[in-house]
């Protein structure tokens, strides 16, 4: 056995605690946030100094400090606030009307099988169609005003919401329906106690997808039919080669998107509190 | 109990031909065709009866007519070719850059953390808003379209691929580790196979977004391509040609989507069916 | 009319259905004649696919039988029957108390009163302190305790149990068997219990009904003459193993015929 001993290696227990400085320990615990922050700040600095040194063409790409000063100038202009108001209205009207119609309709389609078979080809057609392509047609029908943007926002969100809703109702676990029926649940109770809770996660996914689509609808609608709104501001700022103003307007959309998605996630988590949370991978 | 046995719940059962809730296999197809045809017929009838103006609403037969005219005269081909080229180049470049980048970021956690805020922000941004700037930078020619299309497809593919690289089952990773697999073997034998479904999903969604990029870029500045064809016919009140263009784009989207879905199923053979 | 002292009576129940894809006619249950006395604990055992679960669904009214008649005694208070389903049939979106009171809420009882009335049953099944937990936070055994309580709250004449312990590990299963007997002796219900586990059927029941392979029919109706209250040590007595042998031989004969049929 002596021959074998020299091949033995000590096994280091990976879980053994090593002594680390408090800073290193903090870093290990908050690695994600810390590195994210580094990435964010680092890129902003690179952009800023690259621009100042002439490495990045400031004429086209501006620089963070210019964007900030453009933002400060803009928020003092009534025109800017008018653009924000118009875009916000178009977004809200299109998105919420889409939800108000898509959710109930999706539930009906999901519940009545034959109805959903009839609607399926149209839903699939419109869902795989880039709805943005409908813009010229929409402008043809309702003109260049806010109606055209509301319509395109609506179409963007509607199909993103209705398709998962239908799927959610259709895939409700039969077992739970059996349980409810065996306890003599009324049709209404069947809906409120089984169909609705089981479908909520699907609807939430749809709302999140729809939010992104609705924002794209606002931007493209306004770029296409330029009347008022932040999309118009983006278009005009690019034509006049004012990238600082343009980036400021885009950042507004980004923030809306990020905040909206995060807000919906919160709501979703509230409705989903009965579901085991997936453990964060360390 | 004996005295109060009067009340009874009684159920008699007539012979049942088919238990409720069991659909016939042909039902979806039957009702699907029915729903499709009914809408087309109503549309045509409404236009023919003069309930809606044909210049605005067109009708199924008028769309077919426009298609026959423009295909036989050949005027539509350059538009189709240009759009297809824009889509193909932008999509292909996004494919060969987005997937390796996604895998790399997915493998190296800390690098991913560095990029995470930017990727999330770009994901939430309607990136088509950058189209005017890109057109300004690269000119109104086809190059700017490549860039817009690339950007649209690239982000989706990268993010899906990262998610895929994370989806590797920890037990499989541990198995590889316990057999002493090298980093590259672990990558090939565990991480890559488990991320393929995510990649393909990203490719499918990216293909759709690339098409959006084609359309928007052509809307904003171009004199050729299907997006231009739709938009110019919209301003000249030619609804039939607008719808023809939309259907061509939609049809292309559906065909590409179906092809990728088929690929998806092929790569997923080892996975048990969920349904 | 239902005879005195009977809780359930099934006559000539036959079940056949058409396979939706192959369109073949399949006979799930050939013929079932079954009387269950009030307060009796009866178990149906049979090879898998013999139609025992289908029979329970018919009794429960979830499936219409093709032919035949089933009568269930309707008590003066409470429901005529309630079902304890297989594992993970608790609504995952309700807490324990929400699940247990569900049957009452379905009958139109107010949420508050239903919760009050559910409490003693939660205590009876030993889930006190877990009222506000969601099903995913419970172990398999605890989930089935809640499942049992949910059925008991509606105060049924007959408790229908569809392989309630099938998904539990061997030890939990034995604990739950003892628990079920304790709860049964306190709640005083008629029980119709479906299982494919022979020792479980014998240990729990006054009567074991053995079903044939598909198409299902009754092969034997064996009264289990073992003293109550029963403890797990009963399973090691010669009387118990004799019953096990008897039932196993009946089922084994079915398995071989089914196997031969499959080969032929």
Image: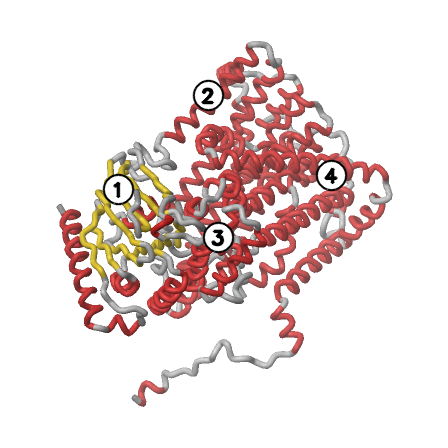
Q: Secondary structure at mark 3?
A: loop
Return the residue at label 4: A88
Q: Position of residue B82 (x, y in %)?
A: 55, 29
Task: For label 4, count other residues whose C-alpha is less than 10 Å away and answer few (under 14), some (14-19) or many (20+).
Answer: some
Residue C223 lies left or right of residue C90; in this view the side is left
On what subunit does the disc labeled 1 rest? C
The answer to which quarter of the image holds residue A229 is: top right
Q: Percent position (x, y) of residue B145?
A: 61, 36
Left or right of residue B114: residue C57: left
Residue indicated by mark 3: C91
Q: Which residue is mark 2?
A: B37
- Reading the chain from its start, which is encountered first: label 1 or label 3? 1
Quadrant, the N terminus of chain A = bottom left
| Residue at horizontal 60 percent and vertical 45 percent from the top | A208
Asked whether, in this view, residue A166 is left or right of residue A237, the answer is: left
Residue B260 rendering spot, x and y as whole percentages: 44, 40
Q: Which mark is residue A147?
A: none
Describe the element under mark 4 as helix, strand or loop: helix
Quadrant of the rendering where the C terminus of chain A is positioned: bottom right
Q: CA distance from mark 3 to mark 2?
A: 41 Å
């Amino acid at each position: 056995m002596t021959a074998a001993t020299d091949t033995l290696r000590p096994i280091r227990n990976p879980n053994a605690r090593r002594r680390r400085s408090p800073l290193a320990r903090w870093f290990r615990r908050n690695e994600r946030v810390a590195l994210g922050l580094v990435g964010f700040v680092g890129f902003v600095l690179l952009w800023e100094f690259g621009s100042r040194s002439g490495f990045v063409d400031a004429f086209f790409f501006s620089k963070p400090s210019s964007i900030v000063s453009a933002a400060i100038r803009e928020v003092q202009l009534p025109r800017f606030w008018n653009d924000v108001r118009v875009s916000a209205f178009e977004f809200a009207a299109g998105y919420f009307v889409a939800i108000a119609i898509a959710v109930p309709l999706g539930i009906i389609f999901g519940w009545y099988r034959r109805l959903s078979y009839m609607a399926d080809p149209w839903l699939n057609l419109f869902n795989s169609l880039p709805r943005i392509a409908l813009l010229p047609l929409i402008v043809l029908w309702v003109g260049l005003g806010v109606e055209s943007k509301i319509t395109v926002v609506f179409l963007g969100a509607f199909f993103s919401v209705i398709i998962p809703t239908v799927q959610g109702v259709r895939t409700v676990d039969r077992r739970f329906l059996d349980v409810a029926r065996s306890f003599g649940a009324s049709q209404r109770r069947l809906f409120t106690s089984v169909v609705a809770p089981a479908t909520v996660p699907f609807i939430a996914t749809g709302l999140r997808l729809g939010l992104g689509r609705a924002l794209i609808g606002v931007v493209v609608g306004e770029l296409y039919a330029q009347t008022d709104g932040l999309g118009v501001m983006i278009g005009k700022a690019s034509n006049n080669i004012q990238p600082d103003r343009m980036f400021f307007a885009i950042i507004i959309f980004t923030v809306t998107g990020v905040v909206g998605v995060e807000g919906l996630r919160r709501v979703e988590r509230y409705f989903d509190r009965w579901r085991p949370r997936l453990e964060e991978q360390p | 109990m004996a005295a109060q046995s009067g009340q009874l719940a009684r159920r008699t059962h007539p012979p049942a031909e088919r238990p409720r809730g069991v659909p016939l296999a042909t039902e979806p197809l039957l009702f699907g065709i029915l729903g499709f045809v009914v809408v087309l017929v109503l549309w045509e009838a409404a236009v023919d009866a003069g309930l809606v103006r044909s210049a605005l609403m067109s009708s199924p037969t008028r769309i077919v007519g426009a298609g026959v005219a423009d295909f036989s005269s050949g005027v539509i081909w350059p538009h189709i070719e240009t759009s297809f080229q824009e889509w193909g180049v932008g999509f292909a470049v996004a494919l060969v850059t987005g997937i390796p980048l996604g895998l790399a970021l997915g493998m190296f956690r800390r690098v991913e953390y560095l990029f995470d805020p930017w990727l999330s922000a770009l994901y939430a941004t309607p990136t088509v808003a950058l189209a005017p700037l890109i057109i300004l930078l690269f000119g109104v020619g086809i190059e700017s379209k490549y860039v817009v299309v690339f950007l649209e497809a690239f982000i989706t593919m990268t993010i899906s691929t990262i998610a895929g690289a994370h989806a590797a089952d920890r037990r499989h990773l541990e198995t590889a580790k316990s057999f002493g697999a090298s980093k590259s073997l672990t990558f090939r034998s565990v991480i890559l196979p488990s991320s393929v479904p995510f990649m393909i999903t990203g490719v499918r969604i990216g293909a759709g977004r690339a098409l959006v990029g084609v359309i928007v870029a052509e809307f904003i500045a171009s004199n050729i391509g299907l997006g231009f064809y739709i938009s110019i016919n919209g301003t000249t009140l030619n609804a039939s040609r607008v719808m023809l263009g939309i259907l061509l784009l939609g049809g292309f989207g559906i065909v590409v989507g179906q092809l990728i879905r088929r690929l998806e199923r092929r790569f997923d053979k080892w996975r048990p069916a969920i349904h | 009319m239902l005879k005195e002292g009977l809780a359930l009576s099934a006559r000539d129940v036959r079940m056949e259905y058409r396979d939706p894809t192959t369109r073949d006619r399949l006979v799930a249950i050939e013929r079932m004649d079954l009387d269950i006395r009030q307060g009796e604990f009866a178990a149906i055992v049979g090879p898998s696919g013999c139609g025992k679960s289908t029979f329970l669904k018919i009794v429960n009214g979830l499936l219409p039988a093709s032919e035949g008649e089933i009568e269930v005694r309707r008590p003066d208070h409470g429901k005529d029957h309630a079902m304890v389903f297989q594992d993970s049939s608790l609504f995952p979106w309700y807490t324990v108390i929400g699940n247990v009171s569900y049957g009452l809420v379905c009958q139109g009882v107010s949420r508050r009163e239903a919760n009050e009335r559910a409490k003693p049953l939660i205590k009876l099944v030993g889930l006190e302190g877990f009222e506000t937990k969601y099903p995913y936070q419970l172990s398999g055994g605890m989930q089935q305790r809640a499942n049992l309580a949910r059925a008991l709250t509606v105060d049924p004449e007959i408790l229908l149990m569809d392989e309630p312990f099938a998904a539990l590990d061997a030890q939990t299963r034995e604990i739950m068997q003892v628990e079920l007997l304790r709860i049964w002796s306190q709640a005083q219900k008629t029980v119709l219990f479906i299982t494919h586990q022979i020792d479980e059927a014998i240990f729990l029941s006054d009567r074991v009904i053995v079903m044939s392979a598909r198409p299902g029919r009754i092969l034997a109706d064996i009264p289990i003459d073992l003293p109550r209250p029963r403890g797990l040590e009963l399973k090691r007595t010669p009387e118990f193993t004799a019953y096990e042998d008897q039932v196993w031989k009946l089922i084994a004969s079915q398995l071989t015929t089914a196997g031969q049929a499959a080969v032929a």
